[in-house]
Image (spheres, coloured by chain):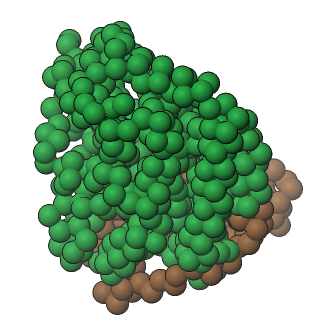
Amino acid sequence: MSAPRPGLDLSLLPDGGVRWLDASGPNSDVVISTRIRLARNVSGYAFTGRAREGERLRMLAQVRDALTGVPSLSGSLLLRLEDLPVVDRQLLHERHLVSKELAGLDPQHPVRSGAAVFLGESVGLLVNEEDHLRLQALRSGFAVSQAFEGVNRLDRELGVQVPYAFHREFGFLTACPTNAGTGLRASVLIHLPGLVLTKEIGKVLAGLQQMGLTYRGLYGEGSEVVGNFFQLSNQTTLGRSEEELQDLLVRVVRHVIEREEEARRVLVRDAGYIIEDKLWRAYGTLRYARSLSFDEAMNYLSGVRLAVGLKLITGLSVYTLNKLLIFAQSAHLAHLEGRVLTDSEANLARAKYVRQVLVSEGGGVE
Amino acid sequence: MLCDNCKERDAVVHLTRIVDNAVSQLHLCEKCAAAKGVETTLSVPQHPLGDILQAVQQQAATTSEDAAACTFCGATARDFRASGRLGCPHCYDAMERSLRELLRRLHGSSRHVGQRYETPVTHVVDKPDTLHDLRDRLRRAIENEQFEVAAELRDRIRTLETETV
């Protein structure tokens, strides 16, 4: 049997689901995006992991019916994950629109019936994830309060239509006690090449863990750090208010941004030409390579992004760099090519795509 | 009176048996009655699993929170330890004490200080359980060998079925 062809019509996604990539937000050269999610469960059902298929489907139907009274998701697109081939589910995951668990990308945990996502403008609602509902908002750059505003509005609208499981003492109840209370996880996707190159990153990461924050890779939980991109988020969800959790993240991330800027100044001061040569080589590889693995592409992109931040390379926009970060991933390349690709085919397609973008959008690079 | 079977626990189930016109009495404790699958109520179970459920229902509930099953989803503290996930919102009540401790360890506090939530007026009463809901819960309880929970669910299904006939 041949692998199913990618079929998801990306034009159906509001803003392509990637407005958060447009680099319009604050500090967007360092902070790619801000995401806030709220975990909620609908009372009257077992949590997703214990629910039977019928319960998951009835809960989904209840939520779908309730959305007529939820303006934040009016005109949203409903995607049933079980109906999509793996390449399309992966594409949604690469765009950070669904979690790995909901997309069923882990061979040991295939997509479950009733897994669905409602995609609205800059907000989304994941249904039958580890919790019944995961409300999320994504914003460009370092925009914690704006992201919270979006997800909080959705939460208030939805909470009137659907009864949430709430406990007087423990707050919003979640399948895993690590999310109970506010159910709020606020995270920023941040690029920290300066701290990595100056070997300061270990201290910074240890420090933020002491402050109650944690770090992960590009795709959140369980993912590895590639290309010096880190996801920083609050560790705890209970015992602090939503505002306190946001304030904590804002305070710590501001400090991390300052440390990163300082590290970049040190790099230019102490290793000016070495850094300049290294970053231009990264650009040269991306501009001319014929085969690029994902990790390779991410590492060179990290170099070029740093060069743009240091104004060593001009004529390339942060938006273009963000686009390369997301669109050079396997499922996106498969969509571009209109077929499922093997790893080596994806490496060729990736190099071709990166070259084309750098030629068409980076013509004035110097 | 001690159980005729184990001779250890108090007999609480008293049976009159008629075999070949000979009448005999059998006095059993809850556990032995359950083990023998004894039907102890007057109602005749309609559910195929009725006998087992009815018998096990007689078992004395285990006192420790550890083995006690959540009455809604049948999950136990043991299940939680194995999977790291609770079964349903009611598990927070069923395992309240140990969860409070765990939440304190995880978050440094067990008291939610964030936004409060009031269940919308139209949903104040838990949504009435449908037969679908109850049957799904019954199947889950049986799969997990939570027979006490299953027995209760079976009774509710019967009641609901009678009402709808």
> In the depicted view, which residue is nearer to us: A83 or A32?
A32
Answer above or below: position of A266 versus B134: above
Q: How many marks?
A: 0
Q: Is residue A210 visible?
A: yes
Q: Where's residue B117, x and y in %?
A: 47, 83
> In the depicted view, which residue is nearer to us: A352 or A270?
A270
The residue at the point 28 percent across, 21 percent down is A355
The residue at the point 47 percent across, 57 percent down is A27
Q: Is residue B79 visible?
A: no
Q: Where's residue A122, x and y in %?
A: 29, 60
Q: Where's residue A348, x and y in %?
A: 31, 12
**What hue does chain A carry in this figure?**
green
**What hue does chain B carry in this figure?**
brown
Q: Is residue A138 left or right of residue A50?
A: left
> In the depicted view, which residue is nearer to us: B82 or A260?
A260
Kindly indicate the quadrant of the structure image that contains residue A235. Answer: bottom right
The residue at the point 62 percent across, 38 percent down is A268
Answer above or below: position of A134 versus A320: below
> In the depicted view, which residue is nearer to us: A187 or B24?
A187
The residue at the point 83 percent across, 60 percent down is B9
